[in-house]
Image: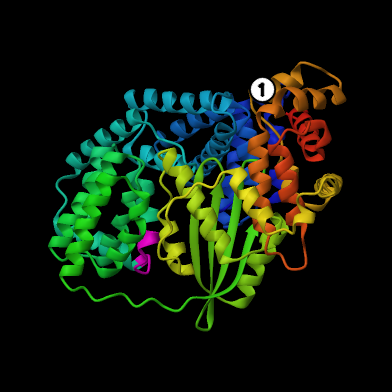
Amino acid sequence: MRLLRPEQAVHAAEMFRPMPGALTTPRAALLRLARLVASDLSRGRVSPGLQTVGSALSESPDAVLLLLDLLLAETRKKRPSERLCDALLLMLGQALAEARMALEADAQGPAAALVADVRRNLVAAAEAGRTSPELLMALARQFALAKLDFGEDLRALTATGAEQAAARGGPVQAEDIAAHYAAMAAASDQDPFLIHEQLSEQVAAFPGEQRAVIVGSFITSDVPAIRAAALGWLLDPDPAVRRQVAQDLAASAARGLVSAACADRMVLMRPWLPEAVQASLDAAVRTCRQRGEPAVAKPAVQINAVIASGCDGAGAQSFFVLLKRGRKLALAALLVKHGFGVRDAWVREDLGRREVDQLLTEVGQQLDAFDGSPEIVEVAVAHGLAVGLDRNEPPPFGLVQVLEAVGLTQVRPERLDAATLIAQLLDAVPDEHRSAPAAAAAALAASKRWPKAYAFLQSWFEQDEAAHAAIGSVRDKRQQREAVLQQVLPLRRARWAELLAWTAKAAQDQVEDEAWIGFALVARELLGERPLDEIPVAGWIAGNTAAALRRR
């Protein structure tokens, strides 16, 4: 992704501070910032600064809505600047991504109103004829990248606009569609996961009924890679789309259009899907087996390393698996967000040692990375699947690619609650190191040093309305910390215990380091009845919350 240069990003938030009216306006400040982003886009420079811009925008709802107005205005010019439009879209997408993270921390907070306002303004603009189908598709892509729902009203307007544009352009010939699919598959190196990633961002702009029809055309395509990519819509958020795709796959299997590799993937995905969808998949797989499709040879999996991170304050935990592929290396990555499910999954192939070393160095600089084992990947995925399915949020299609890469042929959803996880962890610890009061006391004493030793704790703070109210009720810093400790954290003990337990699980296989035992013991104390003012980690969270919210 192309981002702002560091020297530009450092001052991005400053543009949203009140300035003398004669010097600038919020509109002018946003345009100036957008032109800086556009300049970076034109140079192809990459830097980590745009996240700062997204955060600043998301905390200024008026600026986000003004950004949308600027985008709508630019696209309606006789000669719009493509570079500026791309920059405005990118900035809006980053603001939406920040809003989504804020929504997950507090579903009733200001971010909910911001996202609703963006949707409402877009609907009004589309109904007034101030948007084009192409712009709505581009905006739908930003919503999809931010993992936010575009909204049925916007999907319907997008579909209507696309139909009108198609009618003006005349009928599209079947051979043109086939050629387009073939070109896309060739450009994606016949990779169904990459094809799905590209197509899903476009298809997300359409209502479920139209999505199912579009995916149906993928299932019957003459291009095998396009047909294989269609499996990804078995994980569509809309249950009706999932059912229709499964039925279309069963019909397509009867015509010999479902490969053995696709049948294997359907078997892998089957436990993640409701019974009605499973029945259609069973029929498709059975047909493939009866047709005598040759079995797909599974390459030998050589795992060189597994790296697991601690949990950040939002519940995000990353896993990286380094694989040997002949003379080349591959890196499989997973992101599980506790409380929400499996959020991201991808595999990078054909890497050299230098590329891998650079990637792993970046991981080590950004995360607390612990040496792990394939077992933690399987357990974390099973738990994430169960959590996501309970929320009706299927995992990304890339999870199939990751599981295939690491040699896990099937992982069934299985929730692992914090108490069970802690018990499992401590079962591996000698009794004198887990049951004696002295063991807990030693772990609690050691935990005072954790904030300086581990980066993940820097993001451990509360940020919902209850935390804001507690901070706002008093002015003294010490009193603010105490207010969070006594008013907010008693209701959140289980959440923080869960995150510390999963961090202990990540660190369990770390060679010559038994920090995980302390993590597990303190997690047990958080989950128990010990007063919070006797648990240093709780005091840290309270103080960190007060400090973080004072800065906002």
Query: Image height check: is 420 above or below 506?
Result: above
Is 433 one of the magenta-colored residues? no
**Does 289 sit left or right of 381 as displayed?**
left
**Does 18 sit left or right of 107 as displayed?**
right
Residue at screen point 58% across, 59% down: 319
In front: 170, or 271?
A: 271
Query: Image height check: is 73 above or below 307?
Result: above
In front: 86, or 416?
A: 416
Residue at screen point 59% across, 33% down: 105
Residue at screen point 79% across, 55% down: 432
Measured as percent of width and height from the top left, residue 325 is found at 50, 78
Q: Secondary structure at mark 1?
A: helix
**Does 220 sit left or right of 524 as displayed?**
left
Residue found at the very far top of the displayed protein = 473
What's the amino acid at mark 1?
A: Ala
Q: Residues within 10 Å of mark 1 (few under 14, many from 20)?
A: some
In front: 315, or 344?
A: 315
Count of marks overlaid on the render? 1
Residue at screen point 49% across, 64% down: 347
The residue that mark 1 highlights is 466
Q: Quadrant of the C terminus?
A: top right
Measured as percent of width and height from the top left, residue 241 is found at 27, 43
Query: Image height check: is 530 above or below 300?
Result: above
Q: Is residue 79 visible?
A: no
Is 192 one of the magenta-colored residues? yes
Measured as percent of width and height from the top left, residue 286 is found at 20, 63
Span colored in magenta? 187-195
Measured as percent of width and height from the top left, residue 225 is found at 29, 65
Query: Image height check: is 127 above or below 417?
Result: above
